[in-house]
Amino acid sequence: MTVQLNHTIVESRDKREAATFFAEILGLPDPQAYGPFLVLQTGNEVSLDFIDAQGSVHPQHYAFLVTDEEFDEVLARIKDRGLSYWADPFHGQPNEINHNDGGRGVYWSDPNGHNLEIITRPYGG
Ligand SMILES: [Fe+2]
């Protein structure tokens, strides 16, 4: 297959606040303006294009594959900010991480209610 995901749009009440939150928590470069978007580039060249929502934000799920070292760094930032985090996508296991697929994973929320996840192994990996 040659089809690759290139970008997706992330709705937010305040694109600057949301894009900065993602960049800081994940340790990614500063978002760059492109038209009405603030573009956050990820390591596999898929960009998250933040935009101010017209009306209410519909929460989505965004999952990021990270190294073990990055996992430690991101989880430390989550804790430093006093954010809630969970081992599961339904937020039923607070203050825990999971060890699915022989790796580590954790969920937390962005300021708009998007359900964020980091994993060190792909699902089924
Ligand atoms: Fe997921």
Image (cartoon, grey):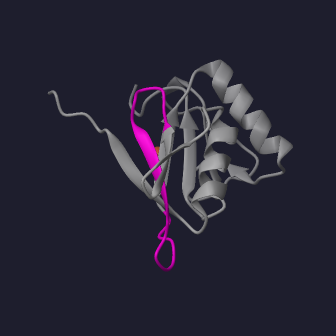
Q: Residue furthest left?
A: 1
Asked if residue 111 is among those painted magenta in the image, a careful observer would answer no
Front-most of residues 117 and 30: 30
Front-most of residues 100 and 57: 57
- Relative horizontal placement of residue 81, taking residue 50 as reference (left or right): right
Q: Where residue 105 sits: x, y (%)? A: 59, 36
Number of disc labels: 0
Residue drawn at 31 percent across, 38 percent down:
6
Q: Is residue 87 above or below residue 66?
A: below
Front-most of residues 124 and 83: 83
Q: Where residue 10 sits: x, y (%)? A: 46, 56
Q: Where residue 79 sits: x, y (%)? A: 81, 43
- Relative horizontal placement of residue 125, taking residue 77 as reference (left or right): left
Quadrant where the N terminus is found in the figure: top left
Residue drawn at 49 percent across, 80 percent down:
55
Q: Is residue 14 above or below residue 19?
A: below
Residue drawn at 67 percent across, 19 percent down:
69
Quadrant where the C terminus is found in the figure: top left
The main secondary structure of the magenta stretch is loop
- Relative horizontal placement of residue 75, taking residue 31 as reference (left or right): right
Q: Is residue 96 visible?
A: yes
Q: Which residues are magenta?
A: 41-59
Q: Where residue 61 sits: x, y (%)? A: 47, 54
